Image (spheres, helix red, strand yellow):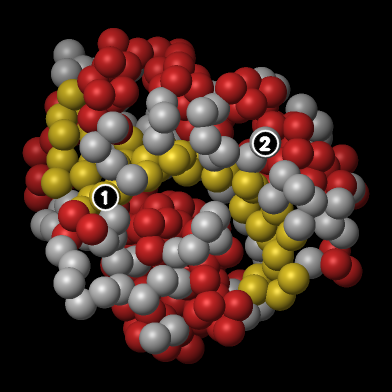
Amino acid sequence: MAMEGELIPINRQLVKEAIRPRPTACHKGTCGRVLIIAGSRGLTGAAVMAAQAAMRAGAGIVTLVCAASLNTIFEIKLTEPMTIPVADNGRGFIGRDSLSTLMDKARGYDVVLIGPGLGRQDSTMALVREFVTGTESQLIIDADGLYAFNGQGSLLKQCKRRPILTPHVGELAALSGVTVDDLKRDYMEIICRESRECNCIIVGKSEKTVVVYPDGSGYVTTVGNPGMATAGSGDVLAGTIAGICPQVRADRSPVVGVYIHGRAGDLAYAEYGNGLIATDMIDRIGRVLLELK
């Protein structure tokens, strides 16, 4: 079981070795197909930032599944990512009645990110649980996608492939069924236990983000700054991990994504300090990828 002193530093060399070189003979379909299930009324920005981050991380194709009544907003905000609007009867959120559509669409993608700004309606939560435990896709579960499993983390053992979870402290506490204070006292022990018992890779977001695997191995970031404590930062991280996922060796996408996100945040911090906003990080993902060539 990884303890704080045993964590492997996530540095440039480690990350560089994990990224597969892109062959000259490639096209958008071979550079990663990412499906994002996200957004609801009042929370469209989360979906937009996740989709834009996935594109900047190098994904060849990014498609956002959204509530049909919000599609016009996404058509205006997003240029490169495509959208798949699903019927929502004007509710402004995706419900369980869209399950078969999502299951079918996911088959055509390398990785699925579910959760940013998705909303917490009962119908949405039921959709998340059934989709996550039923799909054959590689999953990244974030934000409201995690909320669907509060106190029910054991359900994640039903996933067909080992999912990647990206909780902040509050989300991890709720998932684990403990208080935030209890989690902070025994953070590494609890996060390692949850990773093992739920068979998940967990990206524990905090001032020193860690990545923990079910076998007990763990990594800790060497980049990042206080300015990244800003709305949307987690959506950018989730999108970055999704976008890089098809481009890295084995299951290293959480480690690589954490580094790219933190380094992009450092570049933004050098210009804006604590005034940086999440989209500033998206704009610098490409510069980080150049550094890693």
- Asked whether 95 or 195 is in front, the reply is 195
- The residue at which mark 2 appears reads as 199
Amino acid type shown at disc 1:
Arg
Q: Residue at x 74, y 71 (%)?
A: 8
- Classify residue 265 as left or right of residue 11: left
Q: Is residue 266 visible?
A: yes
Query: Residue 222 appears at what percent x and percent y?
Result: 66, 77
Residue positioned 52% across, 57% down in the render: 250
Choose top left, top right, bottom left or bottom right for residue 207: bottom right
Secondary element at tag 2: loop
Residue 104, quarter of the rendered image? top left
Q: Secondary structure at mark 1?
A: strand
Lateral position of residue 63 relative to residue 280, left or right: left
* Amino acid at pointer 2: Asn
Residue at x 76%, y 48% (from the top left corner)? 215
Q: Can you identify the residue that label 1 sits on?
A: 33
Q: Quick one: 76 or 157, which is closer to the camera?
A: 157
Mark 1 Cα within 10 Å, few/some/many (few <14, many 20+)? many
In screen coordinates, is 287 left or right of 254? left
Q: Is residue 140 left or right of residue 220?
A: left
> Is the residue 157 above or below the residue 229 in the image?
above
Residue name at image x 37 percent, y 44 percent: 111
CA distance for labels 1 and 2: 24 Å
User: Which residue is more in the foreground, 63 or 91?
Assistant: 63
* Place of residue 87 in the rendered image (x, y in percent of width and height, measured from the top left): 17, 18
Q: Report whether residue 117 is seen.
A: no
Q: 72 or 260, which lies in front?
A: 260
Mark 2 Cα-neighbour bin, 10 Å: few <14, some 14–19, many ≥20: many
Is residue 282 placed above or below 50 in the rendered structure? below
Percent coordinates x, y for residue 255 in the rendering = 58, 64
